[in-house]
Image (cartoon, grey):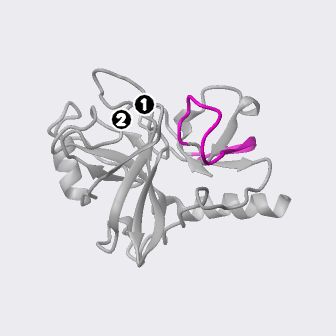
Amino acid sequence: MITVVRVFRRNVSALKVRLGDWDIYKNVEPLPYVERAVASVTIHPGYSSSTMNNDVAVITMSEAVTWSKHISAACLPPGPQPDGTASSGRPHWTGCRVSGWGTESFDRPRYPGVLKKVGVPLWDRDGCVRSLRTTRLGGKFKLHEGFLCAGGEDHEDACKGDGGSPLVCEQDSVSYLIGLVSWGIGCGTASIPGVYIDVSFYIKWIEKQIYSEESRL
């Protein structure tokens, strides 16, 4: 599993991964969830808690999971282009959406019990930087190359509690994990996009962790 570093606020040995959950306040649901212990967490060596740069981590579960009609995985996206441009910036992505159990309002935080999703548009990098420079970040703000931007529509966004949640897009009817909720200036503000980890930028590092873990199993 792939997520962001800042979700880890306790001893990893006490963490569990729950798959297929819908209502986090109920233990009995129409489609049962699957729970696994966390065997290990690998944090990107370049992670900075002050800038949120390289905010990505790989989780290894204690046991494998069998896919079902409500538990499955999104594919990893291709890596950067030969010129270094991240694949997430290419126009072939459609139907992008983010899901999670985060709050519905930045100012009035209330956590819904059920999983929600919302469609979000991707932003080109230059447009994202121009928009973020109009905020408290200021005119000299620079966006780390490991981020991408999405959203920027009124009341349609990820918010508090959604950190690490997946940004999934389609290509040729296949779902790809192209981003992870990382940070933003408020949430659901028109013309101000949210900032996500660009999975394609980190694909080589992610695959290295996955394959090295598989070799130890």
Task: Tell which of 128 and 162 is nearer to you.
Answer: 162
Mark 1: amino acid = Pro
Using the rendered image of the protein, determine whether residue 103 is visible from the camera's viewpoint: yes
| Residue at figure coordinates x 49%, y 68% from the top left | 77
Give the numbered dot on residue 112. Answer: 1
Instruction: State the SS at label 2.
Output: loop
Task: Tell which of 126 and 122 is nearer to you.
Answer: 122
Position of 206 relative to 16 (above/below): below
Q: Residue furthest top?
A: 108
Mark 2: amino acid = Cys
> Does 50 appear in magenta?
no
Pinpoint residue 106: horizontal percent, then vertical percent: 30, 27
Query: How far separated are the C-alphas under marks 1 and 2?
Result: 12 Å
Pinpoint residue 107: horizontal percent, then vertical percent: 27, 22
Give the numbered dot on residue 159. Answer: 2
Image: magenta residue range: 22-45
Give the numbered dot on residue 192. Answer: none
CB of mark 1 within 8 Å of CB of mark 2?
Answer: no
> Does 42 appear in magenta?
yes
Sequence-first tag of 1 and 2? 1
Using the rendered image of the protein, determine whether residue 86 is visible from the camera's viewpoint: no
